[in-house]
Amino acid sequence: MVQAAMSNRDFRDSLQALLDKKLRTKNGFDPGLTQKENLSLFRIPVSPGKLGALTDFMDRRLASHLRILSAPISKDIIRNLKINYSEELPKTMRIRTASLDAKSGKAKRVAASLGLIAALKSDELRRFGERVTGKKLQPDPACQVICYEPGDYSGPHTDHHPEQRELRDGYIDIHIMLSSPKVASQLLVYERRQGMLNEVAEIGKGMSIAVYQLPFWHYTTPMLARPGVDDARRWLLLASYTIERKKPRPKRRRRAKATRY
């Protein structure tokens, strides 16, 4: 029996049903522990068949509308080095991506039709992030879609933005991740203990949600496809939230005390 082709509505309903299993559940983790972690990773159970149908649909509908972002290591870093071990590595990467905050564009229109923007801007996702981090998050996050293909990676970086007032003291990223069954592995190496890239998480399998309390050091290893496969993709839907902070109360002017002689 030939299965009917998936429609945009089928995709939206399937994605939302999978997300609801995690986002609407009030238990499943200890906020007292997750609030202290730079990264909290939550797996979403899904069969390989359903996951493959979702990622194949995104491949067909969205992949061609992403731009390649390539920032390799400059040769000058080695050529111009004068002192042993004095090299500094900027953020390097190779990914496909599109901002979903643009006023227009094919990627945004397709993402909207698939329900991706609605999922990223949902109250359920924001409230989930608040339960995990213990922080009040402002609505209307910045949204982005990222796609990793074989060999794609993001080099060591902190995602610190000291020039942006609303981000310089930290912010929250939430990643909704779907890996095609054709993906063999992709690892996230991150700073769990301060100053140490000492923790590794497998992010190249299945479906999951990751909550980042930034900034901290981290990087993703090159994505590996299963043997004999060249069209494996890992999809990442990103919502970036500013933290709602209490405004400092204006200082009261203290009355001068009368001096007694």
Image: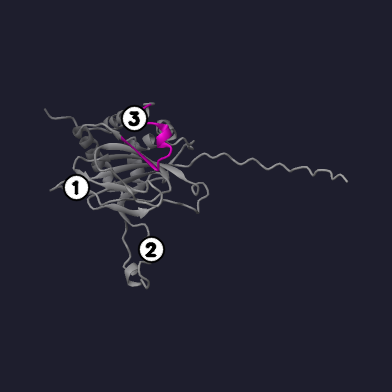
Estimate the x, y position of residue 255 in percent, counting from the top left.
78, 42
State the mark number for residue 22. Answer: 3
Magenta stretch: residue 5 in it? no
Front in this rendered view, residue 38 or 164: 38
Q: Residues within 10 Å of mark 3 (few under 14, many from 20)?
A: many
Q: Magenta segment, which residues?
A: 27-42
The residue under label 2 is which amino acid type? Glu
The residue under label 3 is which amino acid type? Lys
- In this rendering, the answer to whether 30 lies above or below 188 is above
Estimate the x, y position of residue 2 in percent, counting from the top left.
13, 30
- In this rendering, the answer to whether 81 lies above or below 192 is below
Front in this rendered view, residue 219 or 161: 219
**Element at label 3:** helix
Asked whether residue 235 appears in the rendered view, the answer is yes
**Mark 1 or 3 closer to N-term?**
3
Q: How far is mark 2 from mark 3, CA to CA? A: 40 Å
Seen from this angle, which residue lies furthest right?
261
Estimate the x, y position of residue 34 in percent, counting from the top left.
40, 36
Asked whether residue 121 appears in the rendered view, the answer is no
Residue under label 2: 88
**Mark 2 or 3 closer to N-term?**
3
**Element at label 1:** strand
Residue under label 1: 225
Q: How far is mark 2 from mark 1, CA to CA? A: 30 Å
Q: Residues within 10 Å of mark 1 (few under 14, many from 20)?
A: many
The residue under label 1 is which amino acid type? Ala
Is the N terminus in the top left, top right, bottom left or bottom right quadrant?
top left
- State yes or no: discs 1 and 3 in contact (Cβ < 8 Å): no
**Mark 2 or 1 closer to N-term?**
2
